[in-house]
Amino acid sequence: MIHIRSKDEIEVMRKSALMVSATLTEVAKVLRPGITTISLDKLAETFIRDNGGIPSFKGYGGFPASLCISVNNVVVHGIPSTYELKDGDIISVDCGFYKNGFHGDSAYTFAIGNVKPEILQLLKVTKECLFLGIEQAKDNNRIGDISFAIENYTSRIHPYGVVRELVGHGVGRQLHEDPQVPNYGKRGDGKRLREGMILAIEPMINLGKKDVYTLNDGWTVVTKDGLASAHFEHTTAVGRNGGEPLSSFVPIEAAEKLNSELNSSYYDLPVLSSVH
Ligand code: MG
Ligand code: MG
């Protein structure tokens, strides 16, 4: 069943979602070549607990960490490890924060140092198509309108691979609720959206082909062709005229800018196409 949240419940969820953004911002501040992904996970878990929250992912289905950290060809669900980030890597950091009965869920992909232009473009396009999906999260639309907006935009820029095995989802009292929100599909297909539904919209886009597989650890999802993959996610409230992100990239982007001497910025890239 798909829940409709009251205004009060949405405000509680906004607090959890913004705490995910704050956690990702703490991670963004320390990103640099040489740092291990397990140290990012420790920092995030400490920050979450210091703020009275519970890391949603830790122990979820047996997942061993507070963050999913997915480097380069890892699509999602990467397990933090002693791997040291290096110049030219990209990392998707996915985080959940649970407090007062509700989860927030958001993810951001960061560039470490000098990243190849075609990969910076992948990050830019993946973030843009998240916001195009959010625009479609409006009352009376259908799930397929979100899915189509994401897939259609990516295919207009470059023959990227849109991951099919993993999808967005409802989020609320449970981390994963109905409905599923695929990143591919047809306009007008699927369940009808109603104001007050809360969706985690999360495009996962590959530089190469769409095919992925899971490593023997049972978690780490990687691209079959070994090429990079990007992932951006917002907890989003379905609204009357469009979706409203409850999480925010604003503080993350500010931290990213401050780090700009260490992290390549893709905001300065030329606009590749008009969205509208
Ligand atoms: Mg997530
Ligand atoms: Mg999610």
Image (cartoon, rainbow, N blue to C red):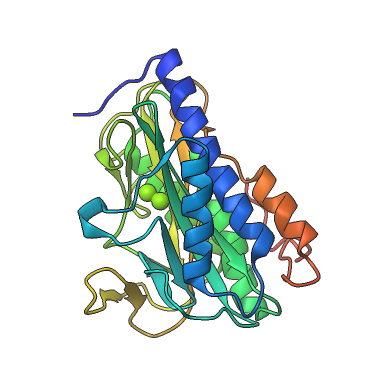
Res 4 → quadrant? top left
Task: Determine the residue positioned at 34% across, 43% down.
Answer: 144
As drawn, 242 above or below 44: above
Q: Nearer the viewer, residue 180 or 25?
A: 25
Tell me the quarter of the picture where residue 111 sits: bottom right
Q: Is residue 137 above or below residue 231?
A: above
Q: Residue furthest bottom?
A: 225
Q: Residue 109 at x, y = what percent?
A: 55, 62
One can see residue 78 in this view: yes
Residue at image location 62% in from the left, 53% down from the top? 26
x and y, in percent, of residue 237 in the image: 45, 29
Residue drawn at (57%, 68%) of the image: 122
> In the rendered image of this protein, does residue 49 appear above or below residue 39?
above
For residue 87, side relative to residue 235 (left or right): right
Asked whether residue 160 is in view, the answer is no
**Residue 269's spot in the image, x, y percent?**
75, 66
Relative to 69, 260 lies left or right: right
Residue shown at the point (79%, 58%) measured from the top left:
258
Residue 182, percent from left and from top: 32, 51
Quarter of the rendering occupied by the N terminus: top left
